[in-house]
Amino acid sequence: MIKTELYRKMKTALYTSVAMLLLAIVSAGDLEAQTETQARFSSPEDSLLCLTHSNLTRDFMRNDDYDLAMESWRIVYEVCPLYTRNTYSRGVDLFLHRFEQTGDIAYIDTVMILYDQWFEFFAPDDQAGIDRRRIAILTQGAYHQNFPEHSVEFYTRAYELLKPYFYEHPDMLINDFYMVFTISGINLLNVGELEMEQKVEDYFAIQKAFDNYLEENPTNLEMIQLRSTNESFYWSSGILTCNNIIPTFRDQLEESPENTELMQRVISMLRDANCTEDEFYFETIERFYAFERSAESAYELAEMHWERENIDEAETYYKEAVELSTDSVRKSQTIVKLMSIERLRENPRNVVELGRRAVGYDPENGLAYYLMAVSFFGAEISENPFINSTVNWVVADYVQKALDAGLDATLRAQAEELLQGVRSRFPRSEDAFFENFYYEPGDSYTVGGWINERTTVRYRS
């Protein structure tokens, strides 16, 4: 059977459904005046006979004398089957009592036959209502503590009874049917009586029924909650795996290649199922982006291209993510990704130019400062070694800005090590004297060339 916790949840959900079903099944009462019946008698004697034994059946049942009640009931059922619908409601109760006493499932067969006749004679326009009564009995039987050996049989009957509603007559569905169909199927799957492919197909049939209903009733909170609960059982049961859901999603998108709502649902479910490494997820994101461009989608596509080492494509999407984003911090973080691409291409000037944009959007972006610092490091802006050594002042400035803004533990350690290194490469005061560099410590100085940064003069001792 199924795992204990999932079994408990299923049992609770089914008991809830059964309670709701039974509350809805209120017998019509014992009004058996001629105006309340559909009597067809072959003679006045039959009329009197049926009226007498119908009342006797009622009275015997009230006194819990089910054997005598059964005798009177059979007379009414056989002599005048169209006398009243109470004949069928009482018959159901009598044969259910027999099942309770014996566990003989043949009595359930009789109950189902009585429901067929009830539907034919008294409720030809209420198939779903009659099946609702059937389902209440089947779900109770599935969890009957005295007859666990019949549980699979009850699940099977409930599943087969409800399946046509989802595949052929979704317009006739009743809310109670959703969870019963789901849980019956999951139980059958767990005992090997239902194939995984069928249960996955059932999931999509159920979702389609929900979609159709909510399209016309989008604010129905009860149905929205029911859909969420139903879906949680599928997730808990391990049915919604990548291998199980992707083939169906692929077919759906081929049939509706421009359905953006479907695309969004597919993307969401693939994320929930941890299918983001699958190529189909990547294809779906790209397909959706072609219809609805957003900073989030552009960034995700950029990340996926980056992981696949498609650098040019990643750069394109990162740039679009920056353009589409309205969040300055997010813009800054995305520009850092572009800085990494330029570092990979060994273009320090481009890294610095992007870095200036990044800190313009977010002055607290420590990583942007750090990448600028390492891009400045070792730059040659002159043929004079002394002038080149002044670049280290700028490097130190940006490393310090990165530390002040905040870095993760690993980068912080690297930044501190770099800061010590560049301080040891500061110009010496005696070298400044021989180079006719007449700036005192603390003076303001602009490091030239492509760096073009204002800094503070510092000499190493």
Image (cartoon, grey):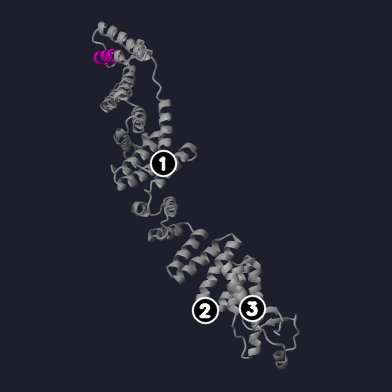
Q: Residue furthest front?
A: 146
Q: Which of the two discs, 2 and 1, labels the residue nearer the N terminus?
A: 1
CA gap, disc 3 and disc 1: 64 Å
Q: Residues within 10 Å of mark 3 (few under 14, many from 20)?
A: few
Magenta stretch in the rendered image: 70-80
Report x, y in % for residue 276.
Answer: 42, 58
Question: Which quadrant of the figure has residue 147?
Answer: top left
For the residues labelled 3 and 2, say whether their Cβ atoms are less than 8 Å apart: no
Q: Name the kind of residue labelled 3 in the image.
A: Gln
Q: Which residue is mark 1?
A: 210
Q: Is residue 449 above or below residue 166?
A: below
Near-viewer residue (27 or 67):
67
Split into 4 quadrants, where in the image is the N terminus? top left
Q: Which mark is residue 53?
A: none
Q: Residue at x 70, y 78 (%)?
A: 455
CA gap, disc 3 and disc 2: 24 Å
Q: Is residue 24 left or right of residue 115?
A: right
Q: Secondary structure at mark 3?
A: helix
Q: Residues within 10 Å of mark 1 (few under 14, many from 20)?
A: some
For the residues labelled 3 and 1, say whether their Cβ atoms are less than 8 Å apart: no
Let me know if residue 355 appears in the view: no
Q: Which residue is mark 3?
A: 420
Q: Which residue is mark 2?
A: 346
Q: Is residue 391 left or right of residue 136?
A: right
Near-viewer residue (135 or 126):
135
Q: Residues within 10 Å of mark 2 (few under 14, many from 20)?
A: few
Near-viewer residue (114 or 119):
114
Query: Closer to us: mark 2 or mark 1?
Result: 2
Let me know if residue 383 appears in the view: yes
CA gap, disc 2 and disc 1: 54 Å
